[in-house]
Image (spheres, helix red, strand yellow):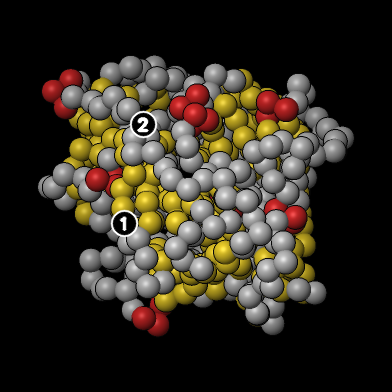
């Protein structure tokens, strides 16, 4: 195992872009004179770091924290540059982004760029440990299209605990297409990050991660961006929600109260070819989706979620498992920046199945993948760079994720993918058997292989994971 060495760097002021950029509004100044809803808490919006606004590397401290989920009551947490979660890091296609991650939590960790198409030696998998007191100086080559991604620890046996403590943040990628599209794009104003997690509280204090937890950790209280029972004030136009299921194990069915329709515009790896009108969306851990909510005809909107059972095929959502995610309060004093969205969003160059040069099969069951548990000293698969492959995934109830690439779904349980799933993805839960097409464009050597795994964090920590190289 390779340990990344480095030195502890002095904490520099965090380069946070707020209202000095016309496309970024300080969310603390947006409420106008509209009275907030009773008994709700203002949604915390992670600070935004625009990597093009600076010439020096982004400095990120991985640190211990004390976060107030309940006012006046502190919980022991961890965060990136703060008490809980981390800043949203804005990057652009074509840039080489330099970030210095300094580990101040007293034990080893890693920082994986979930969704990034980067070589294995900067992917942040379990081999790339940042030991306590050390700094990982990494340069990320951003060559993929606009998308919503995230970063989180990926240390073997510690991923679930570290993410649960609060170590997670968003990577947003923009490109020429995204910047030219007529979409809500003012961060924290009409373009809102939504990190969904579930936690347990006793007398207002978040319970620490259970020692020895092996099965799915499913907890009763929703936490959105570190906020319980949140609201956000938004303009009377279109509002973009970037949804991340950042829970350890729980899947959700999201919808707007009253079954109000919304437009889905993007999956994990980028925009759909055109908006798809929906009234609900199911998300497994690790998945991201971007949706547009029209606030021009709805005074206030409540984004709701059903807690889904472990086995999605055995039960429908129970009304007792219904929870409010976010209250969107329309503020007439806020400038409307977007009233309509384009009918065309993206051109996806789809793979031809006849071009497949290799097929692999993965069965996830009994805590293993293909009847094998994760071994840090074993390379499970070897992939040839640049060729088209078909992976047949029999995952049952397990969300399947692989590093270093986005894929297109070929089939789900024998049927064609739904229109809303016909975009680039990196996390897949067919709730049965599915086929995906993918091609790797970066190398991952034996020293720094990519991972494929179940994205229920307790499952990957206890062996439901494998390693593969790309050469």
Residue 81 image point, x, y percent: 75, 46
- The image quarter containing residue 435 is top left
Q: Does 54 sit above or below residue 361?
A: above
Q: Dividing the picture into quarters, in which one does residue 13 lie?
A: top right
Sequence-wise, which precedes: disc 1 or disc 2? 1
Could you tell whether 348 is left or right of 246 in the image? Answer: left
Q: In this view, does 325 lie above or below 465?
A: below
Find residue 108 and report its horizontal and vertical position in percent. 67, 43
Q: Is residue 193 left or right of residue 341?
A: right
Towards the viewer: 15 or 389: 15
Query: In the image, what residue occupies the spot 16% across and 50% down?
Result: 413
Residue 168 visible in the snapshot: no
Q: Is mark 1 on a helix, strand or loop?
A: strand
Name the residue: 60% across, 30% down: 91
Disc 2 is placed on an element classified as loop
In-front residue for pair 202/41 = 41
**Quick check: can you spot residue 65?**
yes
- Which residue matches tag 1? 278
Q: Which label number is shown at residue 346? A: 2
Query: Which one is in front, 303 or 61?
Result: 303
Cα–Cα gap, marks 1 and 2 = 19 Å
Quadrant housing the N terminus: top right
């Amino acid at each position: 195992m390779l340990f990344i060495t480095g030195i502890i760097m002095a904490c520099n002021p965090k380069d946070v872009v707020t209202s000095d950029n016309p496309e970024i509004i300080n969310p603390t100044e947006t409420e106008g004179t509209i009275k907030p809803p009773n008994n709700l808490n203002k949604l915390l919006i992670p600070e935004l770091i625009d990597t093009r606004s600076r010439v020096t590397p982004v400095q990120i401290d991985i640190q211990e924290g004390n976060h107030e989920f309940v006012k006046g009551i502190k919980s022991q947490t961890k965060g990136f540059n703060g008490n809980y979660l981390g800043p949203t890091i804005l990057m652009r296609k074509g840039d080489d982004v330099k970030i210095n991650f300094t580990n101040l939590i007293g034990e080893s960790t890693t920082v994986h760029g979930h969704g990034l198409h980067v070589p294995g030696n900067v992917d942040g998998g379990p081999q790339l440990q940042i030991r306590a007191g050390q700094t990982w100086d990494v340069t990320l080559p951003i060559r993929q299209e606009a998308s919503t991604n995230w970063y989180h620890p990926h240390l073997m046996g510690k991923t679930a605990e570290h993410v649960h403590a609060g170590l997670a943040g968003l990577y947003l990628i923009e490109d020429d297409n995204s910047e030219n599209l007529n979409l809500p794009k003012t961060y924290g104003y009409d373009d809102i990050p939504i990190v969904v997690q579930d936690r347990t509280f006793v007398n207002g204090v978040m319970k620490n991660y259970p020692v020895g937890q092996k099965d799915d950790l499913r907890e009763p209280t929703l936490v959105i961006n570190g906020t319980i029972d949140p609201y956000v004030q938004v303009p009377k136009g279109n509002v973009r929600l970037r949804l991340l299921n950042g829970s350890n194990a729980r899947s959700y069915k999201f919808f707007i109260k009253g079954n109000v329709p919304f437009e889905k515009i993007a999956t994990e790896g980028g925009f759909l070819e055109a908006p798809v009108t929906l009234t609900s969306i199911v998300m497994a851990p690790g998945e991201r989706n971007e949706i547009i909510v029209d606030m021009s005809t709805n005074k206030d909107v409540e984004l709701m979620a059903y807690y889904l059972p472990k086995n999605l095929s055995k039960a429908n959502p129970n009304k007792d498992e219904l929870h409010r995610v976010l209250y969107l309060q329309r503020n007439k004093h806020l400038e409307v920046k977007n009233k309509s969205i384009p009918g065309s969003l993206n051109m996806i160059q789809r793979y031809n199945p006849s071009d497949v040069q290799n097929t692999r099969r993965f069965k996830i069951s009994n805590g293993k993948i293909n009847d094998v548990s994760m071994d840090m000293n074993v390379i499970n698969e070897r992939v040839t760079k640049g060729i088209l492959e078909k992976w047949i995934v029999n995952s049952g109830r397990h969300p399947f994720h692989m590093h270093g690439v986005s894929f297109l779904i070929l089939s789900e349980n024998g049927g064609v993918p739904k229109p809303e799933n016909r975009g680039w993805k990196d996390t897949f839960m067919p709730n049965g058997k599915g086929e995906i097409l993918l091609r790797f464009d970066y190398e991952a050597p034996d020293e720094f292989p990519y991972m494929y795994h179940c994205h229920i964090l307790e499952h990957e920590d206890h062996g439901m994971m494998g390693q593969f190289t790309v050469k």
